[in-house]
Structure formats: C-alpha cells, structure tokens
Image (spheres, grey):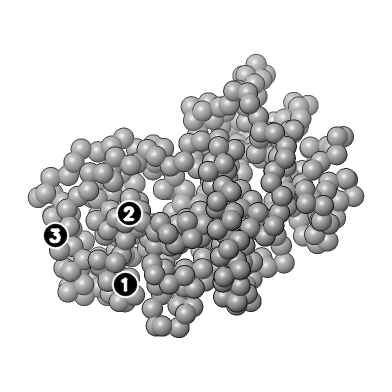
Amino acid sequence: MRHLRAAAAAVALALGALVLSLAPAPPARAGDFRAFVEGLWPAAQGRNVSRATFDAAFRGVTPDPAVLARLRRQGEFGRPVWEYLTGAVSGGRIARGRAEAARRADTLAAIEARYGVPGPVVLAFWGIESDFGASAGTLPVVRALATLAEAGHRGTLFRDELLAALEILEHHDVKPERMRGSWAGAMGQTQFLPSAYLRAAVDFDGDGRRDIWDSAPDALASIASFLAQAGWRRDLPWGVAVTLPPDFDLARYRAPFAEFARRGVRALDGAALPEAGEASLFLPGGAGGPAFLITANFEAIRAYNTSDAYALAVGHLADRIAGGPALAAPWPTGPRLDQAGLTALQRALSARSLYDGPFDGRAGPRLREAVRRYQIEAGLAADGYATPALLEHLRGAH
C-alpha cells in the first residue's frame, strides 16, 4: 500500500515538475520519431503486447507539436490557492454535482460500501477532472505520450506510460481510436495516466470492460478504487473547514480532533468535529484566512495530484456538493512568493536544516512543515504560510 501511494504521488509530482521546469523542445524529425517508436518494440513485447496491437497503435502516428507547447501550463501549480478554488468550485459545478448526487445515489452508495469513499468526494474528483464526464479529453493518448516520450525530458516517465497504454490496448478495454485524453496522456472521465488505469480501474457496471471513457459507473468506481489503494480511510473525513478562537496557539497544529474541539475550534457548518482521529491545521492563506483541519485522507487526495490547491478544491467541492457552506474568511491580498521566491525559501530553510525536500519552487507539506518549524523557532505566528516577509526575515536571521 505504501509503495503504491508513493508511486502514484511520484507520477503526479513528476507531471507537475515537468510543467514547471521544461523548455519546449524542437519538433522531432519524422525519421527520429519512427526510429524511437520501433525502438520500443522489445520493451512492449516484454510486456506481452502483440505485434498486431503495437502496429495498430502507432499506425499513422506522428509527433504532436501542440503537446510540447502545453508543457508550461498547469493551473493548480501556477496560481494562488484561492484563484484555483474560484474556478474549480464554481456555483455551476456545485449545482451539477448535487444533481449527479441525486441521479446516481444508488451507484454512489454501492461504491462507498465497497471502497469506503463517500459519494460527494468521488463526485468532486469527477467534476474537477472531466466536468462530470463532459470534458474527458479529445487528444489521442498514444500520440501525446509518444510525443512526450520521444522528447525525453523526464527520463523514462512518459515512455513507461506509453508502454502501459499499449498494455491497455492489448487487453481490449478500449479501441485505439477511442483512447483519448489530455495533452499529457491523462485519459477519460477520471483523467488517469495509463499506469494508474492498470492499477486502479475497475469494471463496476459488469460489462466486462474497465471503461473510464464512456461508463460513468466504471469511472466513479475507479476513482474510489484509486483512493482506496492510496490509503483512504473510511473512518475519517478528508478534512473539516473550521473557525479558530481568537487566542488559538498556532504552534500546536497537530492533535486529535477531540483536542481541537476542547481548544475551541469549531466546524464552519456548526456540526460537531469528529470524535476520533488525528488532524493537522492547514491555513492555505495564512492566519486570518480560511482554516481547515486535514487528515490522512488529504494525502490520499494528493496521491491523485500533488498540488495542495487541487486537494483543497476536491475537499471543498465535496463539502459543497454535500450541502456545506461557502468559505467565509477572506483570502490574503498582499504580495506572495512566486516560484523563484519559493525556491529561495526552500534553500534558506534547508541551510538551517529545517527543509529536506526538492528545490522545486512549490508549496506543499514539506515546505509547510519547515516554515512552521522556523516560525516557532523565531517566535512568529506558526501558520505555515510562505510569504515574502518570511523570506526576508529568514535572510535577516543569518
């Protein structure tokens, strides 16, 4: 289980790092591309892909220059959390999610019984990934992956995904012309990469195919299957939107729910906090902004996509689909650190032995923890929020 979660997170992280770090490559020459494709045959054969499947998959396939042009775009990593949430958790999406919840109540109940993932959470993924199946992607997956694999910017990542796509075709779950998705090879209503499909896709409607392209039950159950394999705990929520008392000690940010309740933390919707389970305080906009108590299930969501903004959007959309309230606290309006600033912060915290992650210019659990450790050490409000002022404070502390 731990290995599976790490593998899933590694793929998602690699995709994000790809978007942030790559310069577009020159267009591949046709001869080079065909040689690359033919060079894949031994590896494909080693995965029990037949020559007929291999030839059919690559018949007429050429590099797609538009795919390489998309490498630097990925909204959940490039925008502030609050801007991403505005688009991801829109009024229209909430309304469609509630309609789907009513329409598919029996299917969602059966999925929750099998995998332990609540229907609103599954619907939130479905809504964000493909607008409830309406926007599942139109690009040929084999062509997109072959373009990225031949460019070779991320080592073997896309080559391995391309080989996994060939395995799917060999199993006859989908025809080559129907295997469509996004520019980065994420497929169907779930936007699974091929390796995730091989691990987690399920045939929930019983027609003999794991069809994440045209079967909503298969897509929804496959999302739940992925989360279950990533460590989703049926006894915990993803998190709880909360309000904090004025005198709350931010340095004590990890505790059982019961302790947070004793310290005056209240759920935003007025419901009681869970009686059991551990949680961590998450302040994505700093002290004074929206506050959340997140659980281990937040990390299961991040196995699908490593962005904090994405995970928060899934959780909040699930809450809204279930009838929860909108966030009331204001988001910050001051300056924020860009990628270069976050990288500088990571390096400065690493120099103090507080941060041990990559210097990738992205906020996440490791950076958040390191910021809190420094804030506690320096006597600052330990909200875990990275700001230009914090970076300057760190530089002045040397």
Residue 356 visible in the picture: no
The residue that mark 2 highlights is 158
Q: Position of residue 157 (x, y in %)?
A: 35, 53
The residue that mark 3 highlights is 60
The residue that mark 1 highlights is 174
Cα distance in 3D space between marks 3 and 2: 20 Å
Pointer 2 or 1: first along the chain: 2
Residue type of the residue flagged with mark 1: Val
Pointer 3 or 1: first along the chain: 3
Looking at the image, residue 341 lies above or below residue 364: above
Label 1 Cα crowd, 10 Å radius (few <14 / some 14-19 / many 20+): some
For the point 65% across and 29% down, the residue is: 332
Of all residues, the one furthest to the left in this rendering is 31
Residue type of the residue flagged with mark 2: Phe
Q: Which residue occupies the foreground of this view, 360 or 30?
A: 30
Does residue 377 appear left or right of residue 306 in this picture?
A: right
